[in-house]
Image (cartoon, rainbow, N blue to C red):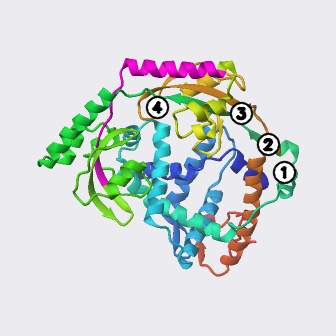
Amino acid sequence: MPLTNLILKFIKLHSIFLFFLIEINSFSFAQGEGKLLDQIVAVIGNQIIKESDINNQLRQIKNQLVEQGDSTDISPCEVLEDLVFEKLMLDQAQKDSIVVSEAQVESELDRRIRFFVMQIGSEKKLEEYYGKSINEIKDEFRSSIKNQLLTQQMQQKISGNVSVTPAEVKAFYNRFPEDSLPFVNAEVEIGQIVVYPTISKEAKAEAKEKLNTLRERILKGEKFNTLAILYSEDPGSAKKGGELGLVPRGTFVPEFEAAAYNLKAGEVSKIIETEFGYHILQLIERRGEQINVRHILISPKFDGTDLLRAKNRIDSIHAILKADTLSFAEAAIRYSEDNTTKDNGGLMINPQTNTTRFEMNQIDPTLFFVIDKLKVGEFSEPQLFQTQGGKQAYRILYLKTRTEPHRANLKDDYQRLQEAALSFKQNEITRKWIGKKLQTTYLRIVPEYTSCKFETFVLPGNP
């Protein structure tokens, strides 16, 4: 892979979810084009690559590049080369008896589904978009995710112990002519302090009483799934009779999971409380460290008084920040009620890159319009917003840093350059492995593609 393309991969095309996006959209495309004839383009060991594999992936990569404003041209030969590499890894993984557990696959599927739910707004919207339930979406892509995890493990085995020194990063950076260094888009780091309305004792008691009545009806013989459809306030599972699907340990919040794993098949739990509200559970089945349960959720409701109290608390925190007696990070640790950010000084994590930096097109519009008006180091007035769970809360937003669009440099982009330098070094090791492995692995490519000039290998008989 050319150096410029390699660094672009890490600086501009750094979405760790691209593979799953391609797979989902490729399935939709294949469904619409199902009547077209397909052909096997390549055979690598006991793996095959079809024409549709190349066309679907090529189309989706081009769409992704257009969305990112990238004019890079991608050819079918480049896509075929990537697929040959993947299939070679899978073939070798099988030979080396590399195993990916069902729990690993389910965990990765859940992680990626959560990302898409966050992007599109809700599980219901995701299901409507693809015309499938969450479980059906998982079923379609379980095999693809397993193959990707096997490929990653095989790559880790080949070059996972490689590292780069600061001197190597600097040398890698210096290999680029200044005018060929890629541009890095403007990015921001955003902090938040969140305050949720405190639910009254009366509202909690009312929710528990409603749920206890439903539990008694179930114990007297009524169907759990019927009552879940009628009364559960979890929109993602209610229409499925409260069923959550077979998932591995570690998927649910601790209180929910502890109750679920203590149940016998068909047993109904006592009322449990989580951050989402009150639940009763029924175990459908357990397979080792995987369980499938139904639940009914009833969430206590807060009123205008509860919301006003939250507003008063956030106003008090805002006054402390204005008095400059605490830094924003210190105030977040002390006062924020959002457990996902408070221990990080309030800084949000970008799920696409797992860093604290966001490109402006990666943040929610309601967030954008507040942050765009702030100067670095400033914080906003308290903002009423809606959480991912659809509840109202207040937050103060803080702009920690903002970078302007610029050419990559060692000062501002060292981490990215370090990743690119490491990838380049790993790439060289992998290239050598591929060359050696292809000497003993069967490879056949149809004549239409034998004129391709591949970066990582040469076809037998080609110069």
Residue 427 relative to residue 280: left or right:
right
In front: 338, or 450?
338
Q: Mark 2 points at which residue?
A: 408
Of the numbered discs 2 and 1, the one sitting upstream in the chain is: 1
Query: Could you tell me which residue is drawn at 46 percent across and 48 percent down?
Result: 113
**Cα distance between the residues tagged 2 and 4:** 35 Å
Of the numbered discs 3 and 4, the one sitting upstream in the chain is: 3
**Cα distance between the residues tagged 4 and 1:** 42 Å
**Cα distance between the residues tagged 1 and 3:** 20 Å
Q: Is mark 1 on a helix, strand or loop?
A: helix
Q: Which of marks 2 and 4 is in front?
A: 4
Q: Name the residue under label 1.
A: 173
Crowd band around label 3 with a 10 angstrom C-alpha radius: few (<14), some (14–19), many (20+)? some
**Cα distance between the residues tagged 3 and 2:** 12 Å
CB atoms at circles 2 and 1 under 8 Å apart? yes
Q: Mark 3 points at which residue?
A: 186
Label ID, residue 387: 4
**Cα distance between the residues tagged 3 and 4:** 26 Å
Number of numbered discs visible in the structure rendering: 4
Dominant SS of magenta comes to helix
Question: Which residues lie in the magenta part?
Answer: 293-321
Q: Where is residue 150 in the image (x, y as percent from the top left)?
A: 54, 67
Label ID, residue 61: none
Of the numbered discs 1 and 3, the one sitting upstream in the chain is: 1
Q: Which amino acid does label 2 sit on?
A: Ala
CB atoms at circles 2 and 4 under 8 Å apart? no
Query: Could you tell me which residue is drawn at 52 percent across and 48 percent down?
Result: 21
Of the numbered discs 3 and 2, the one sitting upstream in the chain is: 3
- The quadrant where residue 379 appears: top right
Crowd band around label 4 with a 10 angstrom C-alpha radius: few (<14), some (14–19), many (20+)? few
Residue 316 belongs to magenta span: yes
